[in-house]
Amino acid sequence: MQAYRHPGTVITDHRFQVPLDHADPAGEQIEVYAREVVATAKERESLPWLLFLQGGPGGRSPRPVGRDSWLDRALDDYRVLLLDQRGTGRSTPADRQTLPLRGDAAAQARYLAHFRADSIVRDCELIRRELLGEDGRWSLLGQSYGGFCTLTYLSYAPDGVREAFVTGGLPGLRSTADDVYRAAYPRVRRKVEAHYARYPEDVETVRAVVRHLREREVRLPGGGLLTAEAFQAIGIMLGTGNGSHALHYLLEDAFRPGVPGQQLSDPFLAEVQGHLSYASRPLYVLLHESIYGQRSVTPRATGWAAEAVRAEFPRFDVDRALAGDQPVLLTGEMIYPWMVVTDPALAPLAEAAELLARRTDWPDLYDPEQLAHNEVPVAAAIYHDDMYVDTGDSLATARAVRGLRPWITNEYEHDGLRESEGRVLDRLIRLVRGEM
């Protein structure tokens, strides 16, 4: 184990060998990386552990410098473990460079089927036993998709959990992918309309950009194809606290003045690429809809649900908007099949992505009966205006999990854990301890 120091913290690297398939513990092994962080003044103390489960899917854990953000509050009480969930960060990677080494598309899809929350939780249990011993229990902090993983943890391995905190990540326990996106499009529309009300000049700028993209082929600096539909996906920015303002500043630089013809500026295209490329987190696209696949809920494949359901919301049609005088609606956290084709980081994995979209036998991720009898103290922040996770689903799940204490707020957006500088985490800790 390698240890080093940052301002106010001591950081230790950990690497663990875990089975690719937990049903075959003697089979192929992969590596999972985690970063231990403890306050310098408490380095030698026997502190309770807090496992952080990052959002995603496919997101690596934070790379802190000192007592960044919510860590400042967490390190008052805990020794924190920042997990690079399997396939992400410094764990055994799963991307366009490594997956083709597995064989054909079918082999790649079989491999990726082991990268959902059920496998992540089993990894965590092996890690917990190695660090804390068989009887040791740790606390969980799940942000966004990390909250989904937390509910899986409480469903199938609650004996390893001392307490749990969830921020913006209470999933619908019985929601299908179709259900999720059918609820998502109206939420996204409200966010886009609120943005246009704040910055009305952006209506025409967006129309001009998508019209430009309809009339000619535009490539991003990394070679990706920027279509009108691809640009619509920039609306994913609107789910964060400062996302509307950041989008406005992005649109300010859309076109390069003083050059012949109408051209999208290089700074604009570079920034758009940063928001739309999945080179750093390919699993986000490849596995996104699979996180809603549960065979006891529906025997059907997820089948590119965001694309299928989109037809029910014609206001999101670019050509219809351009033909009239309506604003072009942006999209949000939707994954479409063309994303795999237009993004060079995903294109080599297109066939595997299609096979995952067709899969019908995803194991269940939640056990509603176990959650109804839950004995682990749980507190959850539910953001009333959350664009990414449906508030209705979160409230229903809060009622379904015995002993869960919800905090419903519109003070923060989906990334409130990070933006609040520890205030959200402090509130949840006090809720679990009965101090509120």
Image: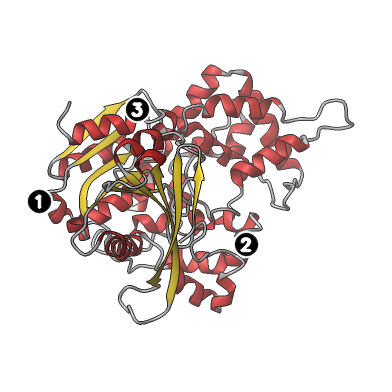
Residue beneath disc 2: 347
Crowding near the residue tagged with mark 3, few <14, some 14–19, many ≥20 C-alpha atoms within 10 Å:
some
Label 2 sits on a secondary structure element that is helix
| Dot 3: element | helix
Q: Position of residue 53 (x, y in %)?
A: 37, 49
- What residue is pinned by disc 3? 423
Q: For the residues carrying marks 3 and 2, which lies nearer the camera in this image?
A: 3
Closer to the eye: label 1 or 3: 3
Extreme-right residue of the structure: 260
Point out the image quarter for the C terminus: top left
Looking at the image, tell me whether mark 1 or mark 3 is earlier in sequence order: 1
Three-letter code, disc 1? His
Could you tell me residue 184's position as x and y percent?
Answer: 40, 40
Q: Is residue 209 above or below residue 94?
A: above
Q: Residue furthest left?
A: 373
What distance separates the C-alpha of mark 3 from that of mark 2? 41 Å
Q: Amino acid under label 2?
A: Ala
- Name the residue rendered at 49%, 77% in the picture: 107
**Do residues under tags 1 and 3 come within 8 Å of each other at their CB atoms?**
no
**Pointer 1 residue:** 373
Residue 23 place in picture, x, y as percent: 30, 76
Crowd around label 2: few <14 · some 14–19 · many ≥20 (10 Å): some
Element at badge 1?
A: loop
In this rendering, the label closer to the viewer, 1 or 2: 1
- Give residue 111's quadrant in the image: bottom left
Image x and y of residue 205, in percent = 67, 26
User: Which mark is first along the chain, 2 or 3?
Assistant: 2
**What is the CA distance from the residue labelled 1 to the residue labelled 2?**
44 Å
- Residue at 72% across / 28% down in the picture? 253
Q: How is the image coloured?
A: secondary structure
Q: Is residue 381 left or right of residue 200?
A: left
